[in-house]
Amino acid sequence: MAEECNPTFAKVDAVLDLLTKSKSLHILLVLDQRDTPLRFSQIKSAVKSSSTTVSRRLKELEDDCLIVRKILEDDTTIAYTLSEDGKLLSPIMKSLFDWSDSR
């Protein structure tokens, strides 16, 4: 008799697939450490990556509802912040980084 797979495993796999892509965790951590929204150029500089990679990761993180893309008050500047789901991931990210540091 085949055992049914818990559907949560697939959800975790999907999140891990996104988070293990180049610079995804780094972008989330940078946004988590800042109190204000960050512009693309600030994120790109902080994670030291190409525009293409940062652009792709920001789009994927936004599509997965982990970050929010905002148009700022001047109506010409776009900035990014963590979404509520992204904020819920914060202690997990910090624990992962702490765990990696301690090894």
Image: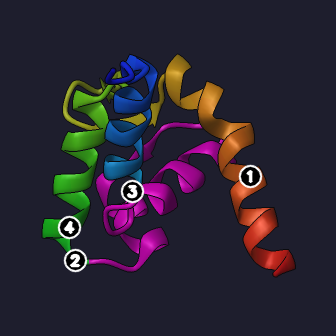
Q: Secondary structure at mark 3?
A: helix
Where is mark 3, residue-wise? 24
Magenta segment, prevailing SS (helix, strand or loop):
helix
Q: Which residues are magenta?
A: 20-49
Residue 80: x %, y % from top left: 39, 37
**Is any atom of residue 8 visible in this view?**
yes
Between 90 and 68, which is closer to the camera in this rendering? 90
Where is mark 1, residue-wise? 94
Q: Please tell me the numbered disc located at residue 53.
A: 4
Quadrant housing the C terminus: bottom right
Q: CA distance from mark 1 to mark 2?
A: 24 Å
Residue 30: x %, y % from top left: 56, 56
Residue 33: x %, y % from top left: 68, 49
User: Along the polypeptide, which appears first: circle 1 or circle 2?
Assistant: 2
13 with respect to 31 (left or right): left
Q: CA distance from mark 4 to mark 1?
A: 23 Å
**Is any atom of residue 67 visible in this view?**
no
